[in-house]
Amino acid sequence: MIFDITHKTQYRYRSTVVQSLHLVHMSPRAMPGQIVRHHSLLVEPAPASRQDGIDSFGNLDVILDIESPHKELVLLARSTVEKLPPPKYNLVATTSWDALDYSLLRAASERDVNILLFRCASRLTTPTLEIADYASLSFAPSRPVLDGAMDLVMRIYNDFKFDPKATDVSTPVTKVFAMRRGVCQDFAHLALACFRALRIPARYVSGYLHTRPPVGRPKLQGADASHAWISVWSPECGWVDFDPTNGIIVRDEHVTVAYGRDYDDVSPISGVLRGGGEHSVDVGVDVNMVANAAAGMINGL
């Protein structure tokens, strides 16, 4: 499948921003199963300097230094991404979760060090005893790690209610767990806290999801949104993506932008300002399928 993605973020400030510095993660990753055909980022007002780079997780990032006084900031990212169907995984044919230490520690390669990083709790994914108990229900001794991961993802999907009014970006995972409601970011953080309670490698993934309107109704412009899910590691399959918000293994309608330990590592836009005061932010995302990947190859897209 080939998707055209438009992601517009608009900040309006009560008073003038004299200068601002921003870190941006809005460039989809090129990775197995995902081909980035085009990406552009327009910024208004134009930055005095722009530095494109790669962060410590291999994500594309942009550092913007805006020195023009402004009361409005607009970032418009446009991307065309081709998604290929992922392989089918045999979840029960993976190493048991309580035998992962042997698989991870028997070799001291750089890859293993990078995987070990994602076993550690981060600021937004620190588990409590209650969260650890909740996680343990999916991981009986010797259960295959990805089979247990699917069970945990389905339990979160069934036990928690999607409610965009219940939380905001600062809501801690402990409150999400207590309320049993939240949004995709909350469910991803909760799942990660569960995995990290058991020292299972798992990472936070940010990106986009192609949504479909109800039958007989048109898709509304701007109705999509940024999305978040998780990725869990096994020696047999490597990293496999799961979506706790929808209770599924991720296939070819999720477009990955970045991954890290939690939202802090991959926030679409963060920064520091001189001035500005109170502000409002409007975000609009459209994800439209423009072609099936196979058809696109035939037609030379």
Image (spheres, rainbow, N blue to C red):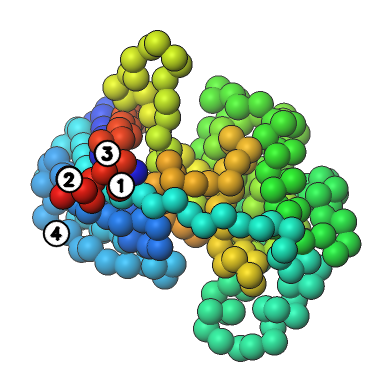
Identified by mark 3, the residue type is Ala
Horizontal side, residue 93 vs residue 278: left or right: right
Horizontal side, residue 198 vs residue 205: left or right: right
Nearer to us in this view, 6 or 73: 6
Horizontal side, residue 103 vs residue 112: left or right: right
Residue extending farthest front = 298
Q: Secondary structure at mark 3?
A: strand
Q: Alpha-carbon neighbours of circle 3 within 10 Å: few (<14), some, or many (≥20)?
A: some
Q: Residue at x 70, y 79 (%)?
A: 103
Going from N to C along the chain, the mark reached first, 1 or 4, is 4
* Residue 71, above or below 88: above
- Residue placed under numbered mark 3 in the picture: 291
Identified by mark 1, the residue type is Ala
Going from N to C along the chain, the mark reached first, 2 or 3, is 3
Q: CA distance from mark 3 to mark 4?
A: 36 Å
- Residue placed under numbered mark 4 in the picture: 49
- Residue placed under numbered mark 2 in the picture: 299
Q: Residue at x 31, y 41 (%)?
A: 292
Q: CA distance from mark 4 to mark 2?
A: 39 Å
Identified by mark 4, the residue type is Ser
Q: Secondary structure at mark 1?
A: helix
